[in-house]
Amino acid sequence: MKRKSIVAKRKANKTKQSIKDLKINKLYTEFRTKIYKNIKKENFALAVSGGSDSLCLAYFSKLYTSEFNNKIHILIVDHKLRKESAGEALKVKKILKKKSIDSNILTWKGKIPKSNIQLNARNIRYSLISDFCIKNKIKYLLTAHHIDDQIENFFIRLLRGSGLTGLSSMTEKNNYNGSLMLIRPFLNFKKKDLEYATLSFFKTYIQDPSNENDKFLRVRIRKYRKNMEKEGLDTNKIIKTVNNLISAKKALNYYKEKALHKHVTFLSKNKCLINKQIFIDEAKEIIFKSFSDILSLISGTYYPPRSKKVVNLIDRVKKVSFNKSTLGGCVIEKKDNNIEISKEFRVKKIGYQLGK
């Protein structure tokens, strides 16, 4: 046991010594600590778009696996949303290959969405990656979300009138679809630092043209932030607010779990019964959170339906006249003194094509 510890320390020191840049060394050390805490020596997957954030994630993951001898599955998603997407995916693969990093291209084979492009692209991405991970028995998925993403999400959800759950945004880890754990090791990292590390190692990255397109709310918020900072609303203050909300959400989740244990019976992974007593015993926010989480879990989607739709559903379900409805890939139906929520199965199953 002692010998293994000595060998592990030697590998860690060798990895750190290979990083000559002190700034990058510090970033990697923080990354390594977070990954070891959550994953240790397990295999994991990550998606690479070719942007500076995800390429930095690939770079640090390569260093980590060389130290611990675990395997990474690096996935490139071709959404087929633009005619150039196949070529872009191959370009990303080539950038990785130059650094001896293997990758797989997942190609969307389903219907191409014509509206709400960014939301649909995200749903396609998570669908393909989740299917791959389940098929290959991978339990952990790393994402490259950073502190600037966290702030942008906060403002997007604030503009939508989101509640506590939405405003508290992303956490370092959370369960997706009951079988995959999402890990976000970069949540305390600034985008400019990730870009610095990426350029140091890869010398290049791919610029997403949509990042400069003002028709997207996220892009407009990014530009508004510069004016907010002039008024004193800087990154530290926003993150302090988000962290306070995350603490409040943890307390809410505690009572939500108690409510689920008391009022909800799972008949299978695709079906559950909610006792109507939940509407009498529990606070409004607990009921909302319970329904949101159940809809997401039963449907197998990462994000639950929008808050307004969930609230409207709860209002309808509470009425004596309610019989049946659908929302977010689920069927909601009255069953005596219970509400049954089951997965809405569609006839046609859409999969993906794996490209080497």
Image (cartoon, grey):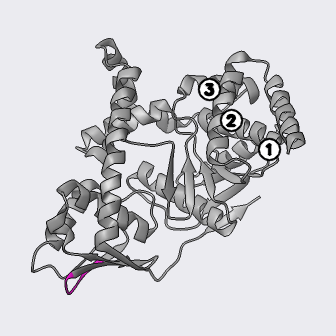
**Residue 306 in view, yes or no:** yes
Q: What's the distance in space between the residues labelled 3 and 1, CA to CA?
A: 25 Å
The residue range painted magenta reads: 332-337
Q: Position of residue 266 (x, y in %)?
A: 39, 77
Q: Is residue 213 above or below residue 223?
A: below
- Residue 181 on the magenta segment: no
Checking the image for residue 68, the label placed there is 1
Would you name the residue on which mark 2 appears?
32
Tell me which amino acid carries mark 3: Glu
Would you name the residue on which mark 3 appears?
195
Q: Position of residue 124 (x, y in %)?
A: 51, 59
Q: Residue drawn at (75%, 51%), measured in percent from left and top?
A: 103
Q: Position of residue 6 (x, y in %)?
A: 87, 35
Horizontal side of 288 relative to 200 (left or right) equals left
Tell me which amino acid carries mark 1: Phe
Residue reaching furthest to the front: 2
The quadrant holding residue 356 is: bottom right
Horizontal side of 281 relative to 229 (left or right) equals left
Q: Secondary structure at mark 2?
A: helix
Q: Residue drawn at (10%, 74%), measured in percent from left and top?
A: 319
Secondary structure, magenta segment, majority class = strand
